[in-house]
Image (cartoon, grey):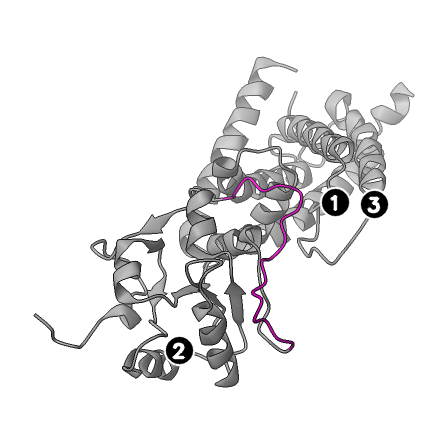
Amino acid sequence: MSAKTIIRMVFIILIGSALGVVNKFVNPKAPGFIGYYPVISATDTAKIPEAADEGDPPYISIGEAADFFNTPGVLFVDARDEWDYNEGHIRGAVNIPFETDDETILENFMAETPKDQPLVVYCNGADCDLSLYLGRTLAAEGFTGVNIFFGGWTDWQLQELPFGKSSESESGDAANQDSGGDN
Amino acid sequence: MRKLLDNPQFILVLRIVFAGIFLFAAFGKIIDPAAFAKSINNYHIVPGSLVNIFALTLPWVEALVGIGLLTGIWGRASAWLTQLMLIMFTIALLIAISNGVNITCGCFSQNPEVKGSLTMDVVRDIAMMIFVTPLLITKARGFCWTEE
């Protein structure tokens, strides 16, 4: 192998890398530059709530939730109340508080969101069934891409995966805009 | 043997075959890098934070190498990179086999439903390593292959 060949090999790798960067920006299926993959034990199984029923939307594990997070176009939905959401949530998630008398957020979300939008609904974790109820509601309303991540915010934090706080501006946060006009 | 290695027709056939294989492999990964990233991560070899960079760039190197072999432009460098990638893929497969992880190769298809045997993938890669070797040492010229 001559020096010229080696230099050309390096160039091919550099050009390939540059094209990869271009692809990142033009291809809607391209992931972000930094991957978020939890370190998962061999037994990465979905947590399933006791109240689970047959016919519920699929329950997914933390590994599957992270896969969805890495997949462009998947929307995370936080079913907890606004206060919990503001304290910290899965990055990019929208907030649809399920335990509330005001159903406008949910109704607006359902009106604005395509029925085949891939969704990951989550809540706090083991002590919270809101993800289950919200997931069922969405599925009953005809949403076909609903997944329930029952490990929720607790498991997400344990894996130190990316999170956001309400003060940060995030894309796709429209459903979180509270029109209550308090204060 | 030397006569075969320097036979322009034989070399041209090898170039076309390997260009086809690598362009085909690259295509699916370029259109869906997120799925390829998942395949890479399943090997548990590349650190999670680097998986996506790998998934974005590797297919383009495969594609460029395919073009290089086909056109003969930087043909020798392309052939060497082909060999290096095959070695890398084979090592990754062997590590996956020895760790006993239940994965699919992700070599051509990123569909996890397509279950193949990793051992057969290793056999295929070794066969490819043997058949790409003539391109590293041939003295045959022609069909735009000008590189020393």
* Residue A150 in magenta stretch: no
Q: Are marks 2 and 3 on the same chain?
A: no
Of all residues, the one furthest to the left in this rendering is A183
> Callout 1: helix, strand or loop?
loop
Q: Position of residue B48 (x, y in %)?
A: 52, 38
**A53 in magenta:** yes
The chain letter for the residue carrying disc 3 is: B
Residue beneath label 1, please? B102
Local secondary structure at mark 3: loop
In which quadrant will I find the N terminus of chain A?
top right
Are the numbered discs 3 and 1 placed on the same chain, yes or no?
yes
Residue B35 visible in the displayed image = yes
Question: What residue is drawn where x is 62% and y is 49%?
Answer: A44
Q: How far, Cα to Cα, is label 3 from label 1?
A: 10 Å
Identify residue type, mark 2: Thr
For residue A101, what is the image quadrant? bottom left
Magenta span:
A37-54
Q: Is residue A51 left or right of residue B130?
A: left
Q: Where B86 sits versus A153, above or below? A: above
**Gap between marks 2 and 1, in whole Å?**
36 Å
Residue A113, numbered label: 2
Q: Amino acid at mark 3?
A: Ser
Q: Indicate the position of residue B57 as horizontal and vertical percent values.
A: 52, 40
Q: Which mark is residue B117?
A: 3
Please state which of residues B41 and B120 is positioned toward the viewer in this rendering: B41
Picture quadrant of residue B146:
top right
Dot 2: few (<14), some (14–19), or many (≥20) neighbours within 10 Å? few
Q: Nearer the viewer, mark 3 or mark 1?
A: 1
